[in-house]
Amino acid sequence: MNLYFFDLDKTLYAYDFRRRLPALATMLGTSQYHLARSWWADGFEARAEAGEWNSADLYLDHFAEVTGTRRLALEEWADARRAAMTRIDGSVAALRRAAELGTVSLLSNNPAATAAALPLLIPDVLEILDGNVLVSCDLGARKPGAEVYRRALDRFGAEASDAFLADDSAANVDGARGVGMAGHRLVAVDGQFQTDALLAAIEGFAAR
């Protein structure tokens, strides 16, 4: 069984935090600087991605407590995140092709609120994934650490040699290769994601 893992941000969807942060700040009546410093710079997002607050409710409760703002509804939080996301059509086409060649799954570093909001954020991609969604908060480990790849493989009962990772991060691709998986780094040249190269890598993995 060939198993294809795809990252979310900057792989299936372009992601610009500079759009998300103003949307959150406007909703909450506070400054972008305050949110960036109190939550992201102080490491709370990374802790959430590793599973410290393993439900959307716990995440949103803690976000409000740490930032001293009102508690967002999941739909509001998703609206702010959606403002930072743009579908990469070529990557979604590559995902669809990979689904014809084997099993596809998301493998993303994100907190529980993202996992809960995926039906609001990426409904078309979820249809292709057919329920195979792995997020670091549920796995209890983050890329590029080796443990996250081992746990992802265990979920499918797969060998590393049968698995492929598509990701924008060189460190994440190197981490996957370190446990015996194949990997391809999706890059952008002059603002254009090189999705033809991604598709070629997927075809090459299937033909090995």
Image: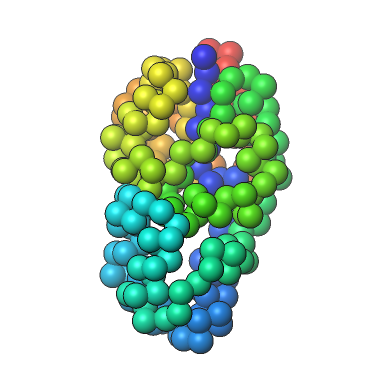
Nearest to the observer: residue 20 or residue 55 = 55
Q: Quadrant of residue 152?
A: top left
Query: What's the residue at 34%, 56% (across, down)?
Result: 53
The reply to whether residue 191 is visible in this rendering is: no
144 sits left or right of 195 in the view:
left
Query: What's the residue at 51%, 23% (across, down)?
Result: 3
Q: Residue furthest front?
A: 57
Nearest to the observer: residue 124 or residue 11 = 124
The reply to whether residue 137 is visible in this rendering is: yes
Q: Look at the image and name its color scheme.
A: rainbow
Residue 131 vertical placement versus 114 (above, below):
above
Residue 194 vertical placement versus 43 (above, below):
above
1 sits left or right of 66 in the view:
right
Residue 67 horizontal/vertical position (percent)? 37, 78
Query: What's the residue at 38%, 48% (across, down)?
Result: 137
Residue 86 horizontal/vertical position (percent)? 65, 56
44 sits left or right of 55 in the view:
left
Residue 166 horizontal/vertical position (percent)? 51, 36
Query: What's the residue at 57%, 34% (across, down)?
Result: 131
